[in-house]
Amino acid sequence: MMFTFLFAAFVAQSAPVSALMPLTDTHRRDMRCAALFAIVSTLQKDRSALALVYPDVTQRGRAYFADIGERVVRETGQTKETVQREFLVQVWQWRDAIDIPEETCSVIAAGMETCLPLLDAADTARMADDATTLPQP
């Protein structure tokens, strides 16, 4: 009985199936980059030499992660929980890829080569948005 009630409540909160859009390649790329920033941030906090060659991605990566998550939810109609699960899939894919010590540096380097420009572009867009929302005297 309780399960039926909880299931009905869950279904009522979920977006209708017809309203859900699949993740695009861009969504997956951006989520993959957000996951990489989380991993690199952790390695930077641990003072790992292979991550310290990059600019600190902790604060910027966190903002990127949140922005991408919100955008994916908004553009696809997926629930936050579904998007969070996809982020976890991306993190585990990165962890599997960097689990081979002799390839870790090249895997992270290739990922950061793709992802850092996206982070810089997101920062620029965020600053432009902030400038337009500041109260004018």
Image: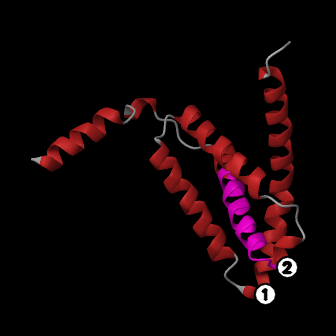
Q: Secondary structure at mark 2?
A: helix
Q: Secondary structure at mark 1?
A: helix
Q: Are marks 1 and 2 in contact (CB under 8 Å)?
A: no
Q: Where is mark 1, residue-wise?
A: 102
Name of the residue lying farthest toward the left: 1
Mark 1 or mark 2, whichever is nearer to me: 2
Q: Where is mark 2, residue-wise?
A: 49
Left or right: residue 113 compared with residue 22: right
Q: Which residue is located at x 82 percent, y 72 percent?
A: 51
Amino acid type at mark 2 = Ala
Residue 88's quadrant in the figure? bottom right
Task: Please state which of residues 55 and 82 is positioned toward the viewer in this rendering.
Answer: 55
Task: Please state which of residues 18 and 108 is positioned toward the viewer in this rendering.
Answer: 108
Q: Which residues are magenta?
A: 29-49
- Magenta portion: prevailing SS class: helix
Task: Please state which of residues 50 and 86 is positioned toward the viewer in this rendering.
Answer: 50
Q: Quadrant of the C terminus?
A: top right
Left or right: residue 18 compared with residue 40: left
Q: Which residue is located at x 55 percent, y 62 percent?
A: 89
Residue 127's quadrant in the figure? top right
Residue 57 has which mark?
none
Which percent across, then down, holds residue 125? 82, 34
The span from disc 1 to disc 2 (Cα, nearest Å) is 14 Å
Which percent across, then down, holds residue 65? 67, 49
Amino acid type at mark 1 = Glu
Name of the residue lying farthest toward the bottom: 102
Is residue 24 depicted above or below 91 in this figure?
above
Residue 122's quadrant in the figure? top right
Q: Earlier in the sequence, mark 1 or mark 2?
A: 2
